Every structure is written in C-alpha cells, then in structure tokens.
Image (tube, rainbow, N blue to C red):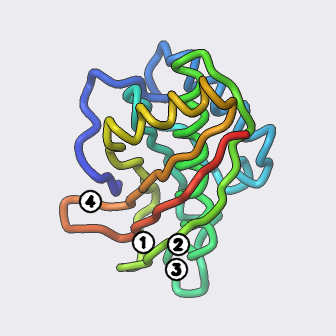
Amino acid sequence: MLQTQSLGDSHSHASDSMTDPLIDKLQQTLHREMPISKAMGITVYDWDGERLSMQMPLEPNRNHQYSAFAGSLNALCTAVGWGTVVMLLESQGLTGNVVIRRGSIRYLRPVRTELFIAKGLPIAREALDYFYDLQQSKGKTKIDVSVAIADEEGTYVSFTGAYVVQ
C-alpha cells in the first residue's frame, strides 16, 4: 500500500469500528455529488484535522500497462483536495460551494499496487488563517492543496490544486 508516511493511531480511519461522523458525511457527499468516485472505488481513509487521505483500488482504474490510469490518479488527487477544503470548512462550522480552479499533476512513476493512498500534504498555518479569515469576512475564499501518492521508496504522483469556495 502506498502512503506518504505512517498515518498513526491517533487519526480517524474509515476502517475503524467507530468512524468519525465527518468522515462518514464526506464519504456520502463524495459519492452523491461525484458518482464516478463510487465506481472508481474511492474511499475516505483518514482525516487528522487538517490533512485528508483517500484510497483507491487499482483494478477498476488500471490501464493497458497494468498500472493506474493517469486520469484516475488525477481524479483521486483532485477529490482529496476537494475533500480537504470541505473538511476544513466543516471543522469550523463554515459552508460554501467548493470547486477546483486549477490543477497541476506530475506522474513520476507507475502505480501498480492493488490499493493505494493519496494523502494531502501539510498546509502552512498562514494559508489556513487566510482561508478561514476570508471565508468569514467575505463569504468566499481560496486555498491551494497539495497531494502525493508515495511510499518509503519515493513519490509516484505529485498534485497541487487551487480551490475556491463561493
């Protein structure tokens, strides 16, 4: 399984017997609002209060090279960024319509494991403060979210998305 780092036991995992209600709500919202995510097998894996991880199986997302299809990897990373923004808003009791404005992805190595995880990378405190302040004062905001699919051997996919909330 590919991970950016150990996710630790102090976080909420979708596989825990008692999952975080925010994770459950995000999973339901993801599949309702982006039905293709269900067919792709995308599931919310972890939320640590600021960073989100989602996992996806290879089989329904493989290409003719028996590696993960680039479009599926992009969709997974985009969903992690979108979900991160949704969870950041929810955690502060804020709402808004989250959309991606721009995305950039680098495919560094083929992904061939049966199940892999895309993990949001840390967001600077200043960026989070600006994100929250702008949403509270203007009713709209923006933030960049970076995501990686990686393991102890290195990074497979690197993604950055610019998200806006209206």
SS at circle 1:
loop
Task: Kindly identify which residue carries mark 2.
Answer: 68
Mark 3 or mark 4: which comes first in sequence?
A: 3
Amino acid, disc 2: Ala
Q: Amino acid at mark 1?
A: Val
Q: Earlier in the sequence, mark 4 or mark 2?
A: 2
In the structure shown, which secondary structural element does the residue marked by tag 2 occupy? loop
Left or right: 53, with 63 as reference point: left
x and y percentages locating residue 46 in the rendered image: 43, 34
**Residue that badge 3 annotates:** 66
Residue in front for this viewpoint, 100 or 119 = 100
Q: Is residue 110 left or right of residue 60?
A: left
Residue located beneath label 1 in the image:
111
The quadrant where residue 113 appears: bottom left
| Residue in the picture at 51% in, 28% down | 133
Label 4 SS? strand
Q: Position of residue 135 (x, y in %)?
A: 60, 30
Instruction: Estimate the x, y position of residue 166 in percent, counting from the top left.
Output: 73, 39
Q: Residues within 10 Å of mark 1 (few under 14, many from 20)?
A: many
- Nearest the eye: 110 or 66: 110
